[in-house]
Structures are given as C-alpha cells and as structure tokens.
Image: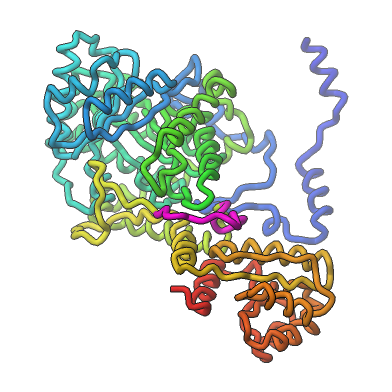
Amino acid sequence: MADSKEKLFSDFPGVSTEAWMEKITADLKGADFEKKLVWKTNEGFKVKPFYRQEDLEGLKTTEGLPGQFPYLRGTKKDDNTWYVRQDIKVECAKEANAKALDLLNKGVDSLGFNINKKDLCPEYIETLLEGICAECVELNFSTCQGATVTLANLLVEYFTKKGYDLAALKGSINYDPMGKMLAKGKDVSNYIATAKALVEIMAALPKYHCITVNALELNNAGSYIAQELGYALAWGNEYLNALIEAGVSADDAAKKIKFNFGISSNYFLEIAKFRAARMLWANIVKEYNPACDCACKMLAHAETSTFNLTLFDAHVNMLRTQTEAMSAALAGVNSITVSPFDKAYQTPDDFSERIARNQQLLLKEECHFDKVVDPAAGSYFIENLTVSIAQQAWNLFLQVEEEGGMMEAVKAGKVQEAVNASNKARHEAVSKRREILLGTNQYPNFTEMANGKAPMGCQCCCGGEHKHECEKPIATLNKNRAADEFEALRLQTENSGRRPKAFMLTIGNLAMRQARAQFSCNFLACAGYEVIDNLGFATVEEGVEAAMKANADIVVLCSSDDEYAELAIPAFQALNGRAMFIVAGAPACMEDLKAAGIENFIHVRCNVLETLKEYNAKLGIK
C-alpha cells in the first residue's frame, strides 16, 4: 500500500508556492495581488487566497487530539453528536408540557423553558415536567434573574423527589447579570452572593450549569466575530474570578459556567471561532490551577443569529440559518438552537418551528455531521483562521482585563460602545451593499408585499416586551437588525398606498443596456417600486413615449457610458419633468449631464439606502 501511494504521488511533481505566485501574477496582468486577492476581514486580519502545507508550520493547533487539553479539537472524542434544542415560552404549564412532549417525539433532545417569575412554585414545576424523563434529555431553564435561586431550589427538590440519579442529569439555569445589564441597562453588578448561592445549590446536580455567558447578546447586536469571542472570554473570566474570590473552588466554579454564542453567516470564520473559543477558555481556566483538566472544558451552546434575519423574502432566512447551523455543528459545539425563519416579524408558528428542527436533523441523519469529530482539523485555511481569530480575541480579552475587567467595562459602557459601533458600521456596509442581505438590499422579490407584516419588538429576559426609551442607568446594546432600515423604507412605500413605477428606457449597446437595466431593477425594487424592464428602443423619444403610456413615475436610462453623452440630455428633455429621470451608471460625462439639469445617477458606488430614501422624498412618499 505504501509503495502504491509513493508511486501515485511520484507521478505528479510538486508545485512550489513560488510557482503558484508566478502563475497568479501573470494572470493578474499587472494588477496588485494584495488589492485583488487578499481579503481583509472585519476583525482586522488578512486572509490569503490560498494556503499550503508550509502555512501550518509553527501552528500548535494541529498538535492535539479531540478530547484532549486545550480542547481546540473539541471536548468530545468518540463522535460529534450535539443536542437539538428548542425553547418554549411558558405561559401555561400544562400547554407547555404538552408541547414539550410533542417536540421530544419529533427529534428534539434539548428543551429550554422560559418561565414567568410569578409562576414559580412546586406544583407548576411538576406540571411543566410531567412525563419528561430528565435523565434522557437536556433541560434548560430561564426566568427573571432575581428569581433564579428560587428556580434552582425548586428543580433540585423536584428531581430529588422523583428519585432521579442527580449525577446523570444534564441542563442549565440561565443566570447572567451582565447579560441583563447589556440588554436592559439595569445595574445588577452586586451579583456575587446570588451566583455563589446558585453554585452551592446546584452542586447537587454536577452536570447542570447555572452561570451563563450570553455572548449571543453581542452577536444579535451585530458584533464582529472576534469581538463576540474576546468579550465572551472576559465575561466568563469575570464570573470565574469572582466566584473563586468568594470561596468557590476553581473546579466547581468553572464547571458551572456555560457559554451561549451566536452564529453569524461567516461560515469558515465561525468554525474557527468555536475552535479558538475552546482553546482560549481552557488556557484561562488552567491559570486558576484546577485539580483536573476536565474543569477547563468549555460547554458551548450555539444559536443562529437574529441580526441578519429579514422580514421580506423571509424564506431566505432558512438558507442563512442552515449554513450557520452547519458551521457550529462542524466546529463541535454541545447544542444548537436554530431560529425559525419568521422570527423577525411574528411569533414562530408550527411550520417554521418544524423547519428549524428539521434543519438540524438533516445535518445529523443525512449529512452525518454528528459522526466525525473536528473534520476541519488540518485544513490549511481553517487552522490559520483559528489562530488569527484566537489572536484578535485574546488581544481584546487582555485589553478588557487591563482596564479593570468585564464588569467595569460594561458599567462604563465601553463594551456597548464598541459593539454598537460595529452595528453602525455593518448597517453602513449593508446600505452600500458591501454586506449583502439577499432579498433585501440585493435581488429583492419584485412582487412581494408585506401585507401587514411588521418587525417584532424587543424581548426582555422574562419574554415580555420592553421599549428602548425606558430609563436605563447603563448603556444598552443596539439590537437593530441589519435589514431594519431597508425594511422600514420598503414598508414606507407600501403603506403610502402608492407604488411608484420605474420604467427602464433601454437603448444602444445591447450588453450594457441589459446589464444596467438588471442592476437598476434590483436597485429600485429594494424600495418596493414596481419595475418595468424592456427589450430596447430605437430612439429615446420612443422610449419616453412608452414610459408615459405605462404611467411611469421614474424613467431610468440604460445604455453604455459612451452613448450617454449623446442620449442622456435628449431623453431628459423629451421627458420634460413628467417623471423622475435617472441615469444608470457614472459616465465620464456626468458633470456635463449635471450641468444640463440631470441630477439622479445610480451605480455600484452609491449608498443604496440613502439614495432610495432621497427618491421616496422626491416622490412624496412619507
């Protein structure tokens, strides 16, 4: 066999990196390699267009095995199974119980119960968990932060009463004061007494986690990947250090901390993020000298992001969440929640919840993602991404620690300021199409109407709605989704009761007029305008006449740059103010056209959102 392999590879001479670069340089024909092919991530590091075996030299990420410290390759060593989780907002214990039992028969093996504080009592817990075998599934609970100790006592009492093997039960209680501060702006920095009490109560359930790092809050606010990871590490370290100072052992404290991460659509970077997260957290915990390396294992739950969910063309959300779930599964997380595709504009219904569950079941049953541990290992590309993400996140972690730790950073609003700046930058990128939201700022569904759909309000930790303008002593995260402003614009158009018609006056060079008509249709349909494409006209006068017969509100001249010099002004004059006139492109003669009174141009360098807002104003749509 070895001889066969040697013969096989000897038939193909090796190609050096220098040879590859010579070929690439020749194909670029003088273009700058860095500008053309090297990608600079939002995190600030560069990604090369190709990687080779020599790029692994010196990287320690390839040295370990799955299940071994520092757990970069995963905390699991036999397979890559994860829990399929679905959360339930509990309004009625009996109804929630019936839904939970139904979900367990449909492939879910992890349940999350969000319980109202006022309902916490032994009878309510018994009704809620009736018929659910707590030893067979993972159970996760959340309630108001001030009632978590009550909830913990009730659960221990219930499980003990039922005669369960407490050491076998797996699950969590969501206690995260810093998460509440980020989301609601309420100062709950005096948390350590509650945290310590929770750890002591939950000692009876050794596989239950009760101190949570909800880095998902950062992801849903539009943070960059390295930001989410860096702050999550500082967040977890804050809790770990505080518990140890309060007298809890390093092992007991670390084993009670759980991380809830978001998953963005940056597929490969997300795989690298989770791998780096386990390694960095293991190294942090190791510094506290735990008695056993098992305390260094990160328990990571992953949930698909809401930041990039859209109201329009909402079924595209399924594509986003599918790739997100794939990256988290391949990265070896412990459990995953897939957000239903309609979550942005309504309470998810049975259909959307079913699809969300099945997205994970497909990854297990048909793709066998649960069979292979860390399949990304050894990839030249992903190993380098893992190191780059780890370095960026670690630098941020050190910066937070040098400035007094995560709690001080949250109280001072530094974390919120940084993440909100990322949110703003990403909204700017969306408005200029540097970040694409399919169906929203690029390739919208031309005929889709919202028909009463509206964005959902914010949710508080108890599941109730709250308003951003309520009094907050501490700054909060901006949770506006990436699509918010485009959706507001399109809803503005739809709710005006008037749908402007944009007519493509195509003329001249066949290839250019078709390309620009397609570009213009996609551009203007983002505001909800009706777009009318055409095969072409012999003269601009003929095109203008056809536009008027179609009752066009907008006429878009689509041709080549060279032809605009002779066609644009006659078309503008023939229209004579009867509709808005737009030139598709940024021709060299633009200043001459502006001097003739033409003021509207759309092209790839436009801020699409601001341009469309301007057009709505000109059309009298408010």
x and y, in percent, of residue 261 in the image: 39, 38
Range drawn in magenta: 438-454
Rendered residue at 82%/59% (across/down): 29
* In-image side of 366 versus 196 (left or right): right
What residue appears at the point 25 percent right and 56 percent down from the top-left corner? Answer: 467
Give the image location of residue 148, x and y in percent: 17, 33
Q: How many labels does the image show?
A: 0
Q: Is 464 positioned to the left or the right of 26 in the image?
A: left
User: Toward the viewer: 343 or 496?
Assistant: 496
Q: Is residue 289 left or right of residue 365?
A: left
- Residue 216 vertical position relative to residue 244 in the rendered view, above or below: below
Q: Nearer the viewer, residue 64 or 149?
A: 149
Looking at the image, is 171 positioned above or below residue 389?
A: above
Give above or below for 536 relative to 244. Answer: below
Q: Residue at x 65, y 77 (%)?
A: 582
Residue 167 shown in magenta: no
| Rendering coords of residue 18 (x, y %) | 78, 44
- From the viewer's side, name the closer residue of 74 and 433: 433
For the point 82% across and 48% down, the residue is 23
Which secondary structure class fits the magenta region best?
Answer: loop
Taking the magenta stretch, the answer to whether it contains residue 440 is yes
